[in-house]
Amino acid sequence: MGQTEISMREGYGRALADYGEVNRDVVVLDADTSASTLTCYFAQRFPERFVNVGIAEPCMVDVAVGLALGGKVPFANAFAALLALRAMEQIRTCVCYARTNVKLVAHYAGLSDYKDGPTHHSIVDIAAMRALPEMTVIVPADALEAAKWVPIIAEYEGPVYLRISRAATIGVHNKRSDHKRSDGLRLKIGQGLTLREGRDVTIAGTGSMVGRSLLAAENLAREGISARVLEIHTVKPLDVSLLRQAAEETGAIVTAEEHSIVGGLGGAVAEALAGVYPTPLERVGIADTFARTALDPESLMDACGLAVSDVVAAARRALARK
Amino acid sequence: MHYPESLIVELEEQARQLRLDSLRMIYKRGAGHPGGSLSAAEIIAALFFHKMRLDPQRPDWPERDRFILSKGHASATLYAALARRGFFPLQDLERWGELDCHLQAHPDRLKTPGVDMTSGILGHGVAIGAGLALAARLSQDPKGGDRNRLGKPLGSRVYVLLGDGECQGGIVWEGALVAAKYRLANLTAIVDYNDVQLDGPVHEIMPLEPLAKKWRAFNWATLEINGHNLRQILEALDTAGEIHHRPTAIIAHTTKGKGVSFMENDATWHGIPPDEAQYARALAELEGEV
């Protein structure tokens, strides 16, 4: 493991442009951020299928809705903080309630826009999107995975929220030897991945925290603690059977996400397990507070309670409650 | 195009029927929006009984023209038009709002045949219409050569009916910018300008004037008509079809509550049903007995 060669947005942007060749129904929208979201790659290759609406995220979502009604497969891109919150009513009414085939791609998610500060951070978007009926919420762990979701969500019929980090996350899939082959990583909406087997405790991570969860598991192994690591890339619909199995077999759960501890993956897992198999659960996330401006994303994550050591400490607390 | 008087009379009768239907529906359900349903009757009659390319047997026909009722609270008039056009049985109108009826308070594209887009929250229609118009253009033969057997170019026209109060929301104008930038000539927005909204007169709550100038300034071809005059409505829709490089806004001056004297121009009737006596009076007026 280690830093991936390319950022998650780079992986997404390249994959989207390539997929535009394969699927001529794809139309890409952006709200004056294409040089940041890297939908500019698609725009350069397919200018006739690229719509820049300017700085008007709610309008972008409605235009995407119209394109979907007309049989296109729109990918609407913007900064997550704006897409999820400013366009929330459009998403609720015209995407989810009307069940239009719109792909919402939320960039600079979590704390990854560290340098622009709390106005630009997106730490409640998973909670907001997850609460919407009909929505599917996907959070990739690295650039390779982000790229692989592009055709999958395009070919899925229905609303999707894909959460993309600005940064290069700690590589998960692109560094694993079993994924070297192009067909190695098999992704399915709603189906979590077991990245590491373990008996004593389960760490269920999503997005940028998956790589950190794997590092935490290595540290725990040195203490003689066997930690299972699950990647819950689809926060909704949640893979309840995988989580239940982990709860039954390891008896303690830690969730880890670059998001508020209110309503995100931790909330989703707590809700699910409370209903089927109540289990000691510790949530690693951003405490119910706004973050700060920083000089790099890694130190900001560390300062906000998302350090590898925070995951390790949470695992120890969960174990102690067994 | 010249329209024979017989067509005008026929459409006027359809509009009167839509008024009767929508009032009966609102009275029966004990809920709904009489004022804005009555003001839109001629516009909806012109579109659904003459102008729009539709096939009630194939509500999903890809080449149909599209209609978005951005002022979704006028749903009663839309439902009546769809039923009378044959999209579903007339009897369904009697069951509007019942728990197991497909007719929702506001239009729902997933439940009701013929409803192209879900609406009810104001402001969405123009931007969604722009997306639909763009999709129609992208789906056309890039050379523009394809025509159907009647010689008409393929591809849908998109009609959006919005309220005047709705134009107080910024998203309407965001959508207008998009439609103008992409020169979506296949998009027509019709403003049902009855000058009354929930809380009172539009010109007092939040004035819109000069409204036509605003649409023109947003680079839309803009027409002003009497929205109860069917000849003017048909001619404006024809004009919109002949403008090839920009979308068209039709500012249709209307009367809220049109056709029922005590409802006309009165904000009270924005969103309440008539009682039994009021309903009887309204029917008598619409049936020409007063």
Image (tube, rainbow, N blue to C red):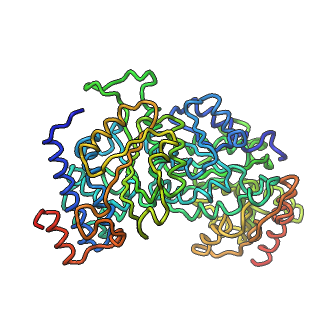
Residue at 57% across, 38% down? A51
* B238 horizontally vs A96: left or right: left
The quarter of the picture where the C terminus of chain A appears is bottom right
Q: Is residue A315 above or below residue A64?
A: below
State the residue in front, B268 or B62. B268
Q: Is residue A241 visible?
A: no
Image location of residue B184, percent across then percent down: 46, 36
Q: Is residue B62 above or below residue B114?
A: above
Residue at 83% across, 56% down? A215
Q: Quadrant of residue B159?
A: top left
Image location of residue A108, percent across then percent down: 72, 50
State the residue in front, A290 or B122. B122
Count of marks placed on residues: 0
* B74 horizontally vs B165: left or right: left
* B183 horizontally vs A46: left or right: left
State the residue in front, B211 or B157. B211
Q: Quadrant of residue A284?
A: bottom right
Image location of residue B143, percent across then percent down: 44, 21
Image location of residue A217, percent across then percent down: 81, 60
Q: Is residue A185 visible?
A: yes
Q: Is residue B114 above or below residue B1?
A: below
Q: Is residue B188 above or below residue A44?
A: below
